[in-house]
Amino acid sequence: NAGVTQTPKFRILKIGQSMTLQCAQDMNHNYMYWYRQDPGMGLKLIYYSVGAGITDKGEVPNGYNVSRSTTEDFPLRLELAAPSQTSVYFCASKAGLSTDTQYFGPGTRLTVL
Amino acid sequence: GENVEQHPSTLSVQEGDSAVIKCTYSDSASNYFPWYKQELGKRPQLIIDIRSNVGEKKDQRIAVTLNKTAKHFSLHITETQPEDSAVYFCAASSGGQNFVFGPGTRLSVLP
């Protein structure tokens, strides 16, 4: 199993540009999450999904959108990039409600100039 | 909502000494408390976790204690080694989607 994978690893955007951060997992996990980690800070939950077709907002959803058309994939969309979105983005997954362990992807480092 | 505080923000110890990091949480419904280690430029890695029906858990040099009444839990690392140097995050969850992370502790183990 590859676990949780993310692409790209690095990206530089100009203000106002759009992009999609990709996340996939091959563990058949129902729960998937998107976090952002600003320099020297902890992780903040952006969006999460409890299964295909179901998504919900986390603590810091403004400026982002997600979709979950399959169990495996959970892309994060930035529509109008702003410097405040400069961060490292981590995707994570866990099996289900009765299990607790989250598995993290390697992260995407995004810079908005 | 849940709020997790973590102290200290930085910690330096001599190799071989013990390190203790403490977290407090606000939501009495939280029942799962993981600890993650994050090395520079890497993803967070789960190192130990504890559930609310357990007071203490140990895995070799790492232990976690939980005081539900006081709403705090602590990470204890004994016989520290240089490879223990990293940022450590605690988190609290009441199940499902709700994971709230502390701000992190940067641990430096000095040779």
Image (spheres, rainbow, N blue to C red):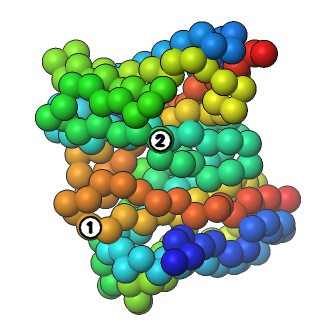
* Horizontal side, residue A26 vs residue B105: left or right: left
Report crowding for label 1: few under 14, some 14 to 19, many 20 or more residues within 10 A (C-alpha): some
Name the residue: 51% across, 35% down. Answer: B89
Name the residue: 47% across, 46% down. Answer: B46
Vertically, is B26 above or below A108? above
- Front position among marks 1 and 2: 2
Residue B82 at x, y percent in the picture: 72, 26
**Chain letter for the residue marked with disc 2 in the picture:** B
* Horizontal side, residue B85 vs residue A10: left or right: left
Q: Nearer the viewer, residue B107 or A35?
A: B107
Instruction: Identify the residue under disc 1.
Output: A96
Instruction: Identify the residue under disc 2.
Output: B47
The amino acid on which the numbered mark 1 sits, given as a three-letter code, is Gly
Report crowding for label 2: few under 14, some 14 to 19, many 20 or more residues within 10 A (C-alpha): some
**Chain letter for the residue marked with disc 1 in the picture:** A
Vertically, is A26 above or below B61? below
Vertically, is B80 above or below B1? above
- Judged from this view, the residue extending furthest toward the bottom is A69
User: Distance of mark 1 from mark 2, alpha carbons?
Assistant: 20 Å
